[in-house]
Image (tube, rainbow, N blue to C red):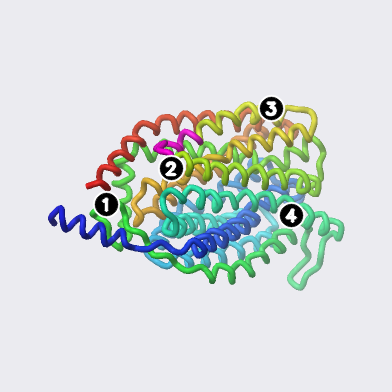
């Protein structure tokens, strides 16, 4: 193929139009609402830790396996195949299939009478993240220009913190009402308040299903390479691409996963921390911690995305990485302090700063992946990141804290010390890893820019 024909083909590919602004933002809003519901279903367990422990006789380590490892196990088996489907087929229907699965599994969590049943049910709830995030990232990436992409993705990513907060706020109110009524007899058995709470929140997926039907599948945008095709690449090609750029991808995969470990560990055990340390009931946790989680987490993610977009537009090529490292480093002292202070509302305020600063990478940093990954393998590369984020972040974060509490301190009320040790260590690890990726990342961007200019 001659250089002239390559340019002609590239120009034709570049003619693929983006959706209108209204249609693009409708997709972001609808997918973000799906993210909210997904996280409510996922995070409601964190509010119900102590009632579940008391009823089923579980340890903190067993609870941590339900909070994170159950999701990671599902990811290890199904995340890449589901992302492969998103790269080859209609992404909306992939998400809708995931919605049916995760909401059904949330409802069935209410039938759990032991650890094994609840573990399997929570594992299947993980299908929400395994379908929604890769396919959602892919849809949004095909709906916005590169300059606007970090902001759009930050809104989508921030939806998880709204869901986390609502899981506490709505869940706290709902559980308090159900607790006041006591065990309830239904046609298919008698259930405890925590079981009924699972069943109730699963019903939120019914109106969501019809909202997602309104999303229109966008055209897949061409890759910035003369090798672009309409077919999703096989796994070995993706492995080769990631391997060729391992000095960029591996530190970023594990660095952002370390940030996720810190945030998810705090999020998983925050409700129990306030309950065990300050004697807060689930209703109080929902009233106070829920709004802080929503406001601080969402603000950090969305602000991070918008600031990163402005920095990119001003010519700072590694803006997504620099901003992430600065924000997390700023959060470190507050992560150490909030579990150790004696006043619950001072602790809550410091935790808000941890969430505000520590969540910036989930808007600014994670948008790095679609910026450097060819379109036709984008969902699968994001799925690889999410697989690692689950194994390292959503799994290791809660387990690290629980293991310190159960095995090192051997005291449930020592959870404050466990959080003060584990979360900062994971944040420092993430900063070091991201710093290692900065130089090769800039070199990769320069090489891509040179290819586009040919």
Residues tagged 2 and 1 counted as in contact (Cβ below 8 A): no
Mark identifier at residue 377: none
Q: CA distance from mark 4 to mark 2?
A: 41 Å
Q: Secondary structure at mark 3?
A: helix
In the structure shown, which secondary structural element does the residue marked by tag 4 occupy? helix
What is the number of the mark on residue 171?
A: 4
Which of the two discs, 4 and 1, sits closer to the camera? 1
**Mark 1 or 3, nearer chain start:** 1
**Disc 2/disc 1 C-alpha distance (Å):** 22 Å
Q: Which residues are magenta?
A: 313-323
Question: How far across and down, in percent of the image, does residue 192 sit?
Answer: 78, 59
Task: Classify 91 as above or below 412.
Answer: below
* Nearer mark to the viewer, of 2 and 3: 2
Residue bearing mark 2: 313
Q: Is residue 320 magenta?
A: yes
Instruction: Tell me the element at label 1.
Output: loop
Between circles 2 and 1, the one closer to the viewer is 2
Could you tell me residue 9's position as x and y percent?
22, 60
Magenta segment includes 14: no
Query: Residue drawn at (75%, 46%), measured in percent from left and top?
Result: 50
Is residue 197 toward the left or the right of residue 160 in the image?
Answer: right
In the image, what residue occupies the spot 64% across and 69% down? 207
The residue beneath circle 1 is 225
Q: Position of residue 315 (x, y in %)?
A: 40, 38
Q: Earlier in the sequence, mark 4 or mark 2?
A: 4
Q: Residues within 10 Å of mark 1 (few under 14, many from 20)?
A: some
| Residue receiving disc 3 | 337
Percent across and percent down for residue 439 are 36, 31
């Amino acid at each position: 193929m001659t250089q002239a024909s390559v340019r002609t083909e590239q120009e034709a590919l570049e003619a693929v139009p983006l959706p209108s602004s209204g249609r693009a933002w409708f997709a972001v809003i609808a997918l973000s609402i799906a993210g909210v519901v997904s996280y409510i279903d996922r995070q409601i367990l964190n509010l119900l830790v102590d009632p579940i422990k008391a009823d089923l006789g579980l340890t903190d380590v067993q609870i941590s396996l339900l909070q994170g490892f159950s999701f990671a196990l599902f990811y290890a088996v199904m995340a890449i195949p589901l992302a492969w489907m998103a790269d080859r087929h209609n992404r909306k229907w992939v998400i809708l299939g995931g919605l049916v699965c995760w909401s059904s599994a949330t409802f069935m969590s209410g039938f759990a009478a032991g650890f094994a049943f609840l573990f399997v049910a929570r594992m299947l709830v993980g299908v929400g993240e395994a379908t929604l995030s890769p396919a959602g990232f892919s849809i949004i990436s095909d709906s916005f220009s590169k300059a606007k992409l970090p902001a759009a993705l930050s809104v989508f990513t921030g939806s998880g913190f709204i869901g986390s907060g609502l899981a506490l706020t709505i869940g706290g109110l709902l559980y308090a009402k159900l607790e006041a009524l006591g065990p309830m007899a239904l046609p298919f058995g008698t259930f405890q308040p925590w079981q009924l709470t699972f069943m109730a929140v699963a019903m939120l997926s019914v109106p969501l299903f019809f909202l997602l039907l309104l999303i229109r599948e966008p055209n897949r945008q061409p890759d910035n390479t003369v090798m672009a095709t309409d077919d999703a690449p096989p796994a070995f090609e993706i492995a080769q691409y990631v391997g060729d750029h391992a000095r960029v991808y591996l530190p970023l995969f594990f660095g952002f996963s370390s940030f996720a470990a810190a945030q998810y560990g705090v999020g998983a055990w925050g409700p129990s921390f306030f309950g065990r340390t300050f004697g807060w009931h689930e209703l109080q946790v929902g009233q106070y911690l829920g709004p802080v989680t929503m406001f601080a987490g969402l603000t950090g993610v969305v602000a991070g995305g918008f600031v990163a977009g402005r920095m990119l537009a001003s010519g700072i090529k590694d803006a997504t990485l620099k901003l992430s490292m600065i924000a997390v480093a700023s959060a470190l002292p507050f992560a150490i302090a909030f579990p150790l202070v004696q006043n619950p509302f001072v602790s809550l305020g410091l935790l808000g700063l941890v969430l505000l600063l520590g969540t910036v990478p989930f808007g600014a940093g994670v948008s790095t992946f679609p910026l450097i990954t060819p379109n036709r393998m984008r969902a699968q590369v994001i799925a690889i990141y999410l697989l690692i984020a689950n194994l390292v972040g959503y799994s290791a974060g809660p387990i690290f804290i629980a293991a310190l509490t159960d095995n090192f301190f051997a005291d449930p009320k020592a959870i404050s010390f466990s959080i003060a040790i584990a979360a900062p260590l994971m944040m420092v690890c993430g900063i070091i890893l991201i710093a290692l990726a900065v130089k090769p990342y800039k070199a990769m961007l320069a090489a891509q820019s040179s290819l586009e200019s040919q």
